[in-house]
Image (tube, rainbow, N blue to C red):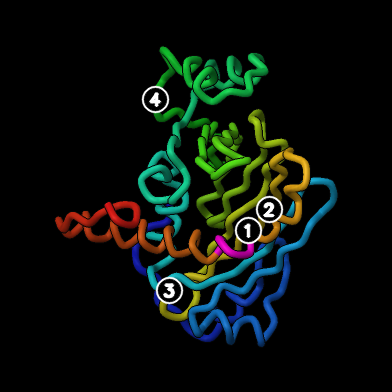
Amino acid sequence: MITGRIYLGVALMLVAAVAAEGRKITDEQWSAIKKGEIVREVQKEGGTQSGAWSAGFFKHPPALMWKAVTSLELYDDFLERTTVSVLLDEGARDRVVKSGAADADEVEKLFAGMKPGYKKVAPDGKWTVYSYQRNSFPWPLNDRWVLLEITHDDQAMKQTWKRLAGNIKEDHGSWELSAAEGGTLAVNEIHIDLDIPATGPFTAFAMDVTLPDTYKMFEKMAADMEAKERGVVKPGKEGE
C-alpha cells in the first residue's frame, strides 16, 4: 500500500484530469470538482438496472483515501445504510454462493467458523477479498445484501468489484484515486440492479441523490482515521 504524503505540481493535475478507464474529465467538470461538487452522470440501463459515473475531490492525501476506500470491514461504521460489512474466507464464500439463499439472516448463519479478515494476494501484488454487505432500505426494498469479489491494485489505487451472490441482481463497478493539487481526485463507476419491478427509475434517482453522501462518508472515514492516528477519538456515522 502506498504511504506518505504526496506533493503535487501541474503535471499531476493533468494526470488527475483523466478519469477511470481513460475517460477524460472536461474542463467544466474539473472546475465544478475543484469547487467541491460531485459531478455525476446517472442513467437507466435497461430493466431494473441503473448505472452511474461520478467524480469528486477529497481534501485528504491519496494514501489516506485509499486506506479508507479499502477498509471494507469499517463500511458498516460509516456508510449510512450499511448495517453489516464482513470479509469472508473462500469456504464461507462458497457456502453462500452454493446456498442460493435470499434472506440475509439465513446467509449470515453460513459465516460460522470462517477465517476473519481473509484476503488473497496475487503474484503481481494485487489482492482480492470477498465482501459481504448488508444494507437497510425503506419499503419496498427492505434489507438487500450482496457478496462481492473485490480486487485492489495498490499501485494504481484502483478497486474493482463484481457480484458473486445476493438478493441484489447485479452490482459491479470501481473506485479509482489519483493525486490532485491539495488532495485526491476520486472517480467512481457503479452498476446496480435491485431486481424489483419498477425500481429502475427509482434506483437511478436514488443514485443521483445519494452519490454525494457516499463521497462525504469516505471523507469522514479518512478524517476519523487521521484523528485516531493523532490519538483523537471521533464518531462514525452521523449522529453517533
Q: Which residue is mark 2?
A: 203
Image coordinates of residue 36 in percent, x first then y, are: 49, 79
CB-based contact (under 8 Å), mark 2 and mark 1 = yes
Tell me: residue 2, above or below residue 58: above
Determine the main secondary structure of the stretch shown in magenta. Answer: helix
Tell me which residue sits at (67%, 61%) in the image: 205
Label located before the other in sequence (4 or 2): 4
Q: How far is disc 3 from disc 2 in space, using C-alphas?
A: 30 Å
Q: Which residue is mark 4?
A: 116
Magenta residue span: 207-211
CB-based contact (under 8 Å), mark 4 and mark 1 = no
Query: Could you say whether the residue bearing mark 4 is in a helix, strand or loop?
Result: loop
Whether residue 216 is in magenta: the answer is no
Q: How far is disc 2 from disc 1 in space, using C-alphas?
A: 6 Å
Q: Is 95 left or right of 26, judged from the image as shown?
A: left
Image coordinates of residue 240 in percent, x first then y, are: 27, 52
- Determine which of the numbered discs, if any, sits on residue 207 in the image: 1
Tell me which residue sits at (53%, 86%) in the image: 10
Query: Could you say whether the residue bearing mark 3 is in a helix, strand or loop?
Result: strand
Disc 1 crowd rating (10 Å Cα; few below 14, some 14-19, many 20+) is many
Q: Amino acid at mark 2?
A: Thr
Depth check, mark 4 against mark 2: the one in front is: 2
Q: Which residue is mark 3?
A: 183
